[in-house]
Image (cartoon, rainbow, N blue to C red):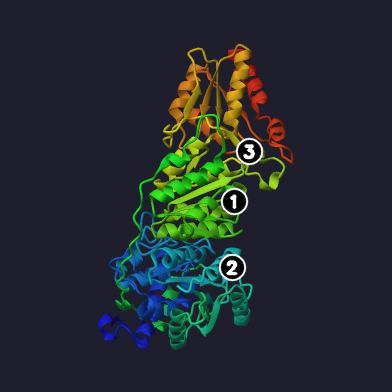
Amino acid sequence: MNIESASFPATDLATAAELAAQLRVDSVRSSTSAGSGHPSSSMSAADLLAVLMSRHLRYDWDRPHNAANDHLIYSKGHASPLAYSVFKAAGVVSDEELLTGYRRFGERLQGHPTPVLPWVDVATGSLGQGLPDGVGVALAGKYLDKSPYRVWVLCGDSEFAEGSVWEALDKAAYYGLTNLITIVDVNRLGQRGETELAWDMDAYARRVEAFGAQAIVIDGHDLGQIDDAMVQARKAGEGKPVVILARTIKAKGFSKAADSPDWHGKPFPKDMADEAIAELGGERHLKIRGPLPEVVSTVRPAAAATDWDHVKYQVGDEVATRKAYGEALVAVGTRDARVVALDAEVGNSTHADLFAKAFPERFFEMFIAEQQLIAAATGLSVRGYKAFASTFAAFLTRAHDFIRMGAVSGVDLRLVGSHVGVEIGADGPSQMALEDIAMMRAVHGSTVLYPSDGTSTVALVDAMADRSGISYLRTTRGAYPVLYGAGELFPIGGCKVLRSSQDDQVTLVGAGVTLHAALEAADTLLQRGIRARVIDCYSVKPIDAGTLITAAEETSGRIVVAEDHHPEGGLGSAVTDALTGSGTRTLTIRRLAVTGMPGSGTGAELLAWAGIDAAHIADAAEALVREPVDRASNR
């Protein structure tokens, strides 16, 4: 049958029942048309979304960026047929687009939802991320926007095996996020069979409550129970984040596939799709919208002009770049009230604690939960805040999936990793970031910065505050001499030539601690009668290929790159990539990096062991200069 929107009022449960049937039918139609997708996982949650959309979600579909709108995050991103069917019911996606644009090349209805659609806050599909991102959005609503909007997150039961989900619930409880409502579609079946807890609703409830949330267990196909649970969740009577645990049936509404383990991630063939649609009562084309958001005025405090005097350093002063980061962060936070900071319980080492003391209302402690650290920063970015997230660089590797999904979401993240390389000394390899540059260079559209002194750190933090995309700042544990005077410019994509003459025979490239070693090596080489050009490659991505090519051409193609990082994907790789195909007739690149597994020791001992200290740089450069030109090659 073909039921028109005028047939039912917009707020009763009878309408919601018809809407649920429509969502199921359209999930089947769209996935069968595309030849791929997850209709069965969409059908299990259709009743939940029908009640939510028609009765509880306060959303202005014509103004998706209305600051008062509720937020709906599909953490269960593979249920994209359901998401897009909701958008059709809201009248923002046409039936034609649903049937011809889903999962097609060049179309916006992608296999998993992304913010190419204005009704989608964050990209999902990597399970266990939507709820952590929702925590960030809810933090913004409660503590910064001070707005009555709610954050609704639809989760699947499979992703409740992910540790990131429990990090999210823990932080939601810690921060009292009663504006965060999680709906879990417990349909029992994952990709290859039963989920860990199947339909053990009591076990789910115990776990949820153990993490400080309120659990409401319901039949996920009883519209009255769903509605009552959402009313209760909105009231948040226990003063805790609410998790609605809904027992559902996969492929609900189609008897041939219902509760079957054989239909995960498979569209129904045309004949079965026709059967399913008929069993569900035929096509419908309801246009339903729920309540509009409350009218609120969100006024953020005006920003003051930044006084940079307290973050100016004298040349020769010894300053750790991690400390300069903290001081610069306070400065940009003074200038711009949208700047917020997060840390993972190491703020007294990253020096994010300086921001926490200056602006406690804009600082969020994520404790030792690096995935939630990045997710919260992502959610805050969704709300328009400039989030800086810091921890030891080695531990950002735990959160790499969240970082790469941030790129898919198109959010702006400002990440800072301290305690990098063997330079940190006695703590040993578990604390040494030796892979972080490679990891961050590989992120789509990322910016990778590695300052060598306090002045450059301040300038780069200032630049990050206004930079879009995902940017990463690598800071050093130890204090090193300031090389640049106040006011020196450090454009992203540039580099600095600290030593240069017309008689240079070799180019030394460093960043961070190895730049200081390169400068010392240049002095040693001069005593040996060799002039060396020294380049501070503070912008690793984008890199200043032009300056590097010029240096190569003017120093007979001789380049020595030293980095406190593994050789794969780091500074040496970036320099080599920039010079490859440059047209330089003779090009010889010697790359000094950490090739072994370090242990404990002093920073000086470990830099020498790794072969990246001044003595090794000088020896490598001298060997390169003494080597006959006709024997030179890339290596």
**Quadrant in the picture for the C terminus:** top right
Name the residue tied to disc 1: 348
Earlier sequence position, callout 1 versus callout 2: 2
Q: Secondary structure at mark 3?
A: loop
The kind of residue on which mark 1 rests is Asn
Would you say 134 lies left or right of 283 here? Answer: right
- Give the spatial CA distance, label 3 vs label 2: 33 Å
The reply, left or right, for residue 179 in relation to residue 285 is right
Give the CA separation, mark 1 to mark 3.
27 Å
Label 2 secondary element: helix
Q: Which mark is residue 166?
A: 2
Give the x, y percent position of residue 178: 48, 74
Q: For this view, does 585 lie left or right of residue 210?
A: left
In the displayed structure, 229 sits above or below 549; it is: below
Q: Which residue is mark 3?
A: 566
Q: Name which residue type carries label 3.
A: His
**Residue at the spot x=47%, y=24% of the render?**
549
Disc 3 packing (10 Å; few <14; some 14–19; many ≥20): many
